[in-house]
Image (spheres, rainbow, N blue to C red):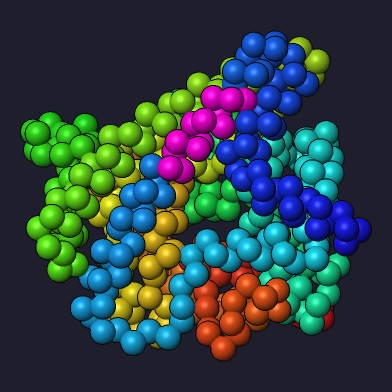
Amino acid sequence: MGNIAASISAVLGSLGGSVLVAIVMCILGFVFRAGAKNSIRGGIYAGIGLAGLNMVVNSATGALTPAIQAFSENFNSGLTVTDLGWGSSGIAFAWPGLAFVILGILAVNAVMVLLKLTKTMWTDIWSIWHGNVVGGFVWAATGGNITLGVVAGVLFLAIGSIIADITAKDYQEFNDMPGIAVPCTVSFLALFAKPFNGLLEKIPGIRDINASPENIRKRMGIFGELGVMGTVIGVIIGILAGYRYGEVLNLGVQIGVLMVFLPKTVSVLCEGIIPIANAITEFVQDRFEGREVYVGVDCAALLGHPSVMASAVLLYPMIVILAVLLPGNAMLPIASLAVIPYWCGAVAAQLKGNVFRIVLFVLIWSIPIFYIASAMAPIHTQAMGLLGLADQAVVNSSFDMGGDPLGAVMVYIFQLFK
């Protein structure tokens, strides 16, 4: 099985998320009789949309990261944990239980769907890497116990499909994507965002703050338009970073590009996914009267609403300042800032696209995440070191997996069985 794991790791690593999405969606289209045209076109457009989305986000993040780093150096924080960001994903493709987690969740999810324990079909093959990182953490923390790592990874993903069921309707309606669900780990935030929104609705004054993109545009005129607002925010961040005027203006334009083109790439993604999701829905309803099944999609599908990136760009400097001010926090986020848009996308539906509420929630949410990422740093460092992915002399962690609340709880529980 070690050879199987190595082979799967090599295939997944060479294909990447966009190609995997295209292949899986195309296969699903044929299996559920969407027709050759819709199946091929849907798969290709889903892959193109995701690739375009990643290109836009990565370009903006690449431009923002050095600016935020320069901005943070002005604080001279002295925080000791190195932020690896999505570098922790290397654990997923290097630890020895990789193949077992992939096969395990596909089998468990199939049984759960058949037994009506979940409505979400785990078709988002790429996002299984999150479960594999949890498995790798448990493997490292239990002295190399692959079995415990595999069980932890599969259980983590199975819980993700249940969370996807709970959040599916909100995402479908808000993002205008019928039939989809998001089993990716960020959906966990939505479970807390909904009661948080209910709480804000009860607070006089706060409940009346309507910072939807439409209202911002109406009140601020040209400065409320996404492209202009993104450019202005980018310019401000560049000034705070101490950039020269040319660099300031270039950063502003790059953030403006992000704000304008991100929703367009998501619309391409939807153009591919929705016909196939509809075909699956019709197929299931024809054969199982009263059954409802959701298609699991990547969390990137949640980034299209204008409130998402507007909130994320505002949060970048706020999160860095918060890291410095929090007593007991050990990690300065730089690489992990890339996850902020996905946090915003995960809660935009529950917070009704209100930029004020999204920013407030994510700021509050990030407080425990800082402490979890700091506490998980020894295990994070150990796993990376054992797999030859990082120097164990350099203590490291991340927001996305090192700071994942559900993953951390599972790691600490499974440590009891070593």
The residue that appears at 43% across and 42% down in the rendered structure is 55
Residue sitting farthest toward the right: 1
For residue 182, above or below residue 37: below
Magenta-span inclusion, residue 48: yes
Q: Nearer the viewer, residue 94 or 302?
A: 94
Question: x and y percent of residue 405 in the render?
Answer: 56, 66
Q: How many marks?
A: 0
The residue that appears at 49% across and 31% down in the rendered structure is 49
Q: Quadrant of the C terminus?
A: bottom right
User: Which quarter of the picture shows residue 321?
Assistant: bottom left
Question: x and y percent of residue 380 in the render?
Answer: 60, 76
Q: Is residue 365 left or right of residue 380?
A: left
Magenta-span inclusion, residue 321: no
Q: Is residue 287 left or right of residue 313?
A: right
Q: Nearer the viewer, residue 47 or 218?
A: 47
Magenta portion: prevailing SS class: helix
Q: Quadrant of the N terminus?
A: bottom right
Q: Which residues are magenta?
A: 43-55
Q: Is residue 234 left or right of residue 198?
A: left
The residue that appears at 44% across and 56% down in the rendered structure is 339
User: Which quarter of the picture shows residue 135?
Assistant: bottom right
Is residue 245 something that shows in the picture? Answer: yes
For residue 352, above or below residue 134: above
